[in-house]
Amino acid sequence: MKIATLGRPRSFYPVLLIPVIRGNMFKLALAALALLFALSAHAQTIPVKTPADLSVGDDPTKGTSTSTGTTLFCVDQSGFTLTSSTADPTSSPSVNYTSWLWQEIDASGNAGALPATATPTNEKLVVTSATPGWHTYQVTAATGTASCPADPVIFTVFVLPNLTVTSAVDQTNTPSLTYCAASGAPTDPTKQINLTSTVGFNGSLNSVPGLKQFQISDFDLSYTWYRQDVTTASPPPPTQVATTTTGNYTITDPPVTSAGTEKKYKYSVQVNYKVKTCGATPYSAITQSSGVDAVITVTPKPGKPVITIQ
């Protein structure tokens, strides 16, 4: 059947082409979606900013056993005590456990011997210190029949490693480390004095199968920059000049037109985790230039000369 158009062009209606997925392709698409949802449900939040980011529903097979920070430690303050229940919670009347076997999950995923810093005493496990990284502890309780113990239960904690910090003047523009006080610190991008820092884990992290092996880039860090007047032989303590969310800082001293004397300054940076403040001694570094402490010199603007005639 023909449609009469009376000499006018027929209207065109765009059609969205939707591909039809059939057979194996459809199954593969569903599998990919299922994998995507599974990965999102089993992963920590990156970057890590709060203790809750290390937990996935308080499931010890996926992250820390709590999301409140009680299972997150600094390596220099990593002592804690785990306590098992003393009675079978499913029995009626109540039946007390008579023995507890404490173990730690090793890098192969097997329950093995405890380290020397973990001491079991009946229902308690006292850990005086733990190495950086993941630690999953397992307890198996029994009510008197050794051949019929309860199912094992696990508990997972994470220990933050110490940090290593270095800092240096960015030599990209070969900046001068001397500027005039009346002009202030250079603002021209090709002359600015940019300071950088590099942070890393101090040592390796203990691993447990199924739990993410973290890199330093997986954690949000805070950077606090300090300046110290080293003009005299007995310099005063450093003063804070900036807090940054990255490892870079650009010196931005404003112009000073009042008369003064030449000043010399050193800069340093302190770094810490946002998820938890660690370090009995702050993680810090003095900014370097060519392998030595960088010294920024600020020269005063001299007064006008006087002209005389003879």
Image: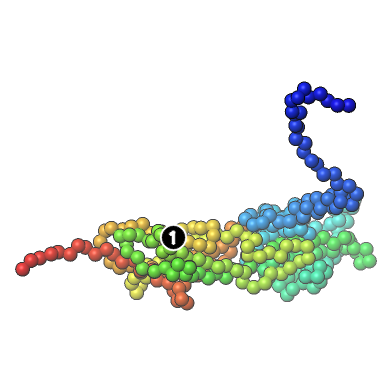
Q: Position of residue 48 (x, y in %)?
A: 64, 57
Residue toward you, 99 or 136? 136
Q: Position of residue 38 (x, y in %)?
A: 79, 53
Quarter-wise, where is residue 85 in the image? bottom right
Residue toward you, 285 or 246? 246
Instruction: Name the residue rendered at 74%, 58% in the picture.
Output: 63
Residue toward you, 118 or 16? 16
Residue 126 visible within the image = no
Quarter of the picture containing the N terminus is top right
> Which residue lies most toward the front here?
7
12 lies left or right of 280: right
Quarter of the picture containing the C terminus is bottom left
Residue toward you, 235 or 246? 246
136 lies left or right of 74: right
Residue 150 visible within the image = yes
> Which residue lies most toward the bottom here?
291
Which type of secondary structure does the marked residue at label 1 adopt?
A: loop
- Disc 1 packing (10 Å; few <14; some 14–19; many ≥20): few
Q: Amino acid at mark 1?
A: Pro
Quarter-wise, where is residue 133 in the image? bottom right
The number of callouts visible is 1
Q: Position of residue 7 (x, y in %)?
A: 75, 24
Specify the color scheme.
rainbow
Instruction: Name the residue rendered at 90%, 49% in the picture.
Output: 23
Residue hosting label 1: 189
Quarter-wise, where is residue 231 in the image? bottom left
Instruction: Name the residue rendered at 81%, 23% in the picture.
Output: 4
Instruction: Name the residue rendered at 55%, 68% in the picture.
Output: 198
> Which residue lies most toward the top here?
6
Q: Position of residue 303 (x, y in %)?
A: 21, 63
Q: Is residue 76 above or below residue 15?
A: below
